[in-house]
Image: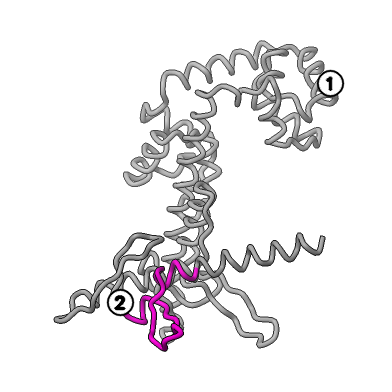
Amino acid sequence: MPGISWTTEDKQRLADLVRSGHGPLSIYRLGCFAANGHGVRSVDAIAQQIRRMHLASPENSERARKAHERGISVTPEARRQATEFLRRNGSDIPVNVVAEKFGVTISWVRRTLKQLGIQRSWAATAAHPLSRFHDPEYRAKVSRRVSAWAKEKAREHKQELKARRVELLAKSPKLAKRCCEQCGENWPLTPEFFAATKHEESAKTYYLYTCRLCAAANRHKHDESGDHPHPRTERLRRKLTARREEVRKLKAPPQEKRCIACWEDWPLTLEFWRTSKLKSGQTHFEPRCRLCQNSKRRSDERARRARALWGRS
C-alpha cells in the first residue's frame, strides 16, 4: 500500500530541519509532518525520505551503519550482561560508557533503562567523570542541537497562537484585546495569550503587558544575563523614552538635564524628574532622573530591610 506523498513544502521544511541538526527521531518528536488525516509520520518514514533526498551527512550515515552492524553482532550473552550491569549501576553511569563496554548501541541502553524503570538525572550523568559533556566540542554540539530545537518549537508555538487568535476573534469579534509592548501585536486579553494573576481580596484578574511569547523570551534573556528588571520599570522606561522623543519634537522644547546615574539627557519637567522643597521654599530637581531615582529608592528600601533583619537576628 503506497504511503502519503511528500509535498514540496514538506521536503523544504525537512531539509531545513536536517541542516539545523535534527535527526529522524527528534523530527518525529516535533510532530512537524502530520499527514492530512493520517496522523504523524513515523520515524522510519522520515529517515527514508532523508535518504531519498540525500540529506544525511556521511558521518551520520557511517555511524548508523556501524551501530547497525554492532547491534547485529552483539550476542544474547553480552546483552544479558549489559542488562545486569545497568540494573546495578544504570542510575549514574553514562550511556556511552555502557555502549562501549558491552558493544551495544546507545539507543538499546536507553530503551533498557526505560524497561528497567531506572530514572536518570541529567545533571548527575553530565557531572560523572566519564561523561562526554566534559569534552568542549561535544558540549558545543549538543548546545547547537538543543538551541535549534528550541527555536523550532518557539516558531511552531507562535504559529499556533496566531491561528488560535484568528479562531477566537472570528467567534467573538468584541473580545477584549491588548497590544504587547514588546512585539506590538494585538492579542486577545485571555490567560492563553497573557500571563495573569488574580488578586485575593478584590478577586480581580490582572494581565501582563507583554504576551506569553515575549515574556518567555525575556525570561531566557534574563537567565543568561543574570539581570531581572521589574516589568513596571521596563514599561515606564519605554513610556518615558517614547515621551521624550515627542517632547523634543515640539516647537519650543524645554531645557534638558543630564542624570548623574544613567548619563542620559531628559527634559527638565516634572514628567521626567522628581522634585523636593528646599528650606528657602524653592523647588529643586533631583540629580537623578525619575527612573534612576525609583531604582535608588528600591535599593535603599532593600538595604533598610536587610539591616533590620540582621539587627533582629
Is disc 2 surrounded by few (<14), some (14 to 19) or many (20+) residues within 10 Å?
Answer: some
User: 114 or 204, which is in the foreground?
Assistant: 204
Which is more toward the observer, 16 or 97?
A: 97
Residue at the image position 46 percent from the left and 50 percent from the top: 35
Residue extending farthest left: 251
Region in magenta: 269-294
Query: Which residue was labeled with disc 2?
Result: 268
Residue 58 higher or lower than 214, as above or below:
above
Q: Position of residue 150 (x, y in %)?
A: 49, 46
Horizontal relation, residue 213 to residue 128: left or right: left
Disc 1 residue type?
A: Glu
Total number of numbered discs in the rendering: 2
Q: Quadrant of the C terminus?
A: bottom right
Give percent across and percent down for residue 85.
Answer: 81, 20
Which residue matches tag 1?
Answer: 84
Q: Are marks 1 and 2 in contact (CB under 8 Å)?
A: no
Q: Is residue 90 left or right of residue 42?
A: right
Residue shown at the point (45%, 18%) measured from the top left: 59
Which is in the foreground here, disc 1 or disc 2? Answer: 2
Question: Is the residue 212 above or below the residue 203 in the image?
Answer: above
Q: Is residue 166 visible?
A: no
Q: Is residue 21 magenta?
A: no
Q: Quadrant of residue 260?
A: bottom left
84 to 114, vertically: above or below: above
Q: Is residue 291 magenta?
A: yes
**Left or right of 120 in this view: 182:** left
